[in-house]
Image: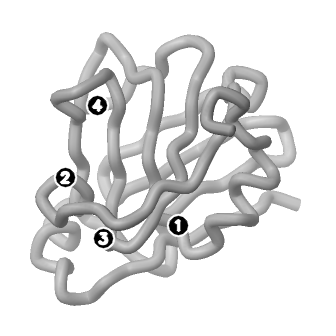
Amino acid sequence: MNQFFPYAVDIKFAPIWLPLGVRPSKDGVTITDDGRFRATYGFLRLETQLDNVTGAHITRSYRWWTAVGARVSFVDDGLTFGTNTRAGVCVHFREKVPSALGLKGYSALTVTVADLDGLVQILGADESQS
């Protein structure tokens, strides 16, 4: 059975993520039975094989302008699907994964899911962050 990790939403930021079509009950991260990692964020999607995931770790305490909404990092080639400023999971990829926000692809995706520990446990701890 697919495992679904919905976003932990902070309703005060709805004016930022709602126009992108984000539906708190429908969007989030899905680990599929056929071995795929899929993150949906309203009209946006990022999907890859699970064997392309090299690890994941929890990050916390974001500034709202760097964490809420669909954001491309100015520091690295990471992407964020964010719904709150509290915490998220940064997922790292072996090969860059394309999305509608950039055809070159991304080596990491931060998702602000409700079950941080559960997602990290399934994806495996990122050894570089230990």
Disc 2 from disc 3: Cα separation: 9 Å
Disc 4 from disc 3: Cα separation: 23 Å
Q: Amino acid at mark 3?
A: Thr
Disc 1 from disc 4: Cα separation: 21 Å
Q: What label sits on residue 85 in the rendered view?
A: 3
C-beta proximity under 8 Å, tags 2 and 1: no
Q: What label sits on residue 100 in the rendered view?
A: 4
Which of marks 3 and 2 precedes in the sequence? 2
Which of labels 4 and 3 is toward the front?
Answer: 3
Residue at the spot of label 2:
66
Disc 2 from disc 1: Cα separation: 16 Å
Which of labels 2 and 1 is toward the front?
Answer: 2
Q: What label sits on residue 55 in the rendered view?
A: none
Q: Amino acid at mark 1?
A: Val
In this view, 127 is above or below 29: above
**Mark 3, residues whose alpha carbon is within 10 Å: few (<14), some, or many (≥20)?**
many
Residue placed at 42% from the left, 63% from the top? 60
Which of marks 1 and 3 precedes in the sequence? 3
Q: Position of residue 18 (x, y in %)?
A: 20, 73
Residue at the spot of label 1:
113
